[in-house]
Image (cartoon, rainbow, N blue to C red):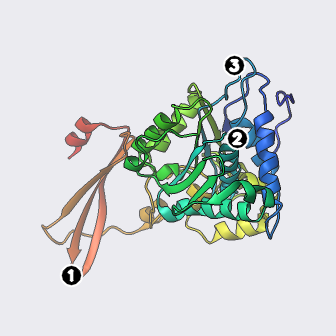
Amino acid sequence: MVSLLNQPDPLWKPTVHTEADKDYDYTDADRAIAIANMAFGSLPTPFQMDEWQEWLIREILSRDPDTGKYRFRSYVISMGRQNGKSTIAVCLSLWFMLSRGDANVFCLASNRDQAGIVYQRLLQAVINNEHLNKRINRTTETRGLGTKTGGLFRAMPSKGAALQGHSLSGVIADELHLMPESVWDSVLIGAGQQRDSIVVGITTAGSSDSTLLLRLYENGKQGATGMGFALWEADEHDDPYSIEALRKANPALACGRMDEDQVLSEVAMLPKSDVIRYRANRFVDQDHAWLGMDAWLQAGRAEVTTKEVVLCIDRSPDWSGATMTASWMDGEDVFTDVVFSLANTNFERLLGAT
């Protein structure tokens, strides 16, 4: 058994992750990595997993040598976009399907097309490798694969009703920032019925509306029992356009697979809110903001020319912020201005301010 304790931190190490408190058994993980690399090496454009991806698989599939059980029942991964999250998902899906005869494996995402991305990559890995082709076939279900021993893989949208009553061997849950809390809780219950089942959530940062992800971040940082957590994100005060900040949030960049000049050219063309969220992997105050706060504050203030004013109040789910705006029409033009903003508020303060 190889010890991973007291090893020097590589550049791609997560900003925050669940630290190992003993020497764990990585036998299953090493087998899963070997299977995945065999499959990826058979593709028309062959490749092998990055060092950070192999490290992450070892964390997820580590076993406690004292109990023989997997260290984690759930594991949450958060990083910038386009780092190779689907490679992690395919590796885990193959292991879940092949490590037990009657596996029931789900891949969930916000919609059917997104869930199908992992399915297509898994399918290509299977049909291009003679060893996997003998053991795994397409099923009659859309986006389904089955093993000769009765195992099943399904890619499907994350809808709670469709998940009720399933005993799950493994779950890959993509886009946690969009997933309802009820869906995550349903798969945890379904996976809890099997001894070695693991639920793995993969995501980028969310917005103030991402209640499930906010909850999982808090649980992960506090070291919730049975939950593993790996977060790659830039620091709050980092310049999100700097290569140093981008390395912190993107392990594929930090390990050298991504081209630095290409990434810097890409982020230079993106709105700041998108750079912060999708590349620096930090939460933003609201989803899909079309105008940054700096630009908003620099805009001139319009004079109210009518008595017909529409007031709108918006707040974050945890009451960390609330804003009232006023909107009115002047001819064919619509004007909007901020009436007030409150930080760390509650219903009574908000009511009093109005």
The residue sitting at the bottom extreme is 332
Q: How far apart are marks 2 and 1 (CA)?
A: 68 Å
Hey, which quadrant is residue 345 in on the image? top left
| Left or right of 165 on screen, residue 38 | right
What residue does disc 1 label? 331
- Note whether residue 108 is visible: yes
Give yes or no for contact between labels 3 and 1 (Cβ–Cβ under 8 Å).
no
Camera-side mark, 3 or 2: 2
Q: Residues within 10 Å of mark 1 (few under 14, many from 20)?
A: few
Q: Which of marks 3 and 2 is nearer the N terminus?
A: 3
| Left or right of 308 on screen, residue 49 | right
Hey, which quadrant is residue 231 in on the image? top right
Q: How crowded is mark 2: few (under 14 residues within 10 Å), some or many (20 or more)?
A: some
What residue does disc 3 label? 67
Please say if 301 is above or below 110. Answer: below
Given residues 25 and 193, the one toward you in this image is 193
Camera-side mark, 3 or 1: 3
Percent coordinates x, y for residue 277 in the rendering: 56, 56
| Left or right of 310 on screen, residue 87 | right
Q: Which of marks 3 and 1 is nearer the N terminus?
A: 3
Amino acid under label 1?
Answer: Gly
Amino acid under label 3?
Answer: Thr
Give yes or no for contact between labels 3 and 2 (Cβ–Cβ under 8 Å).
no
The label shown at residue 99 is 2
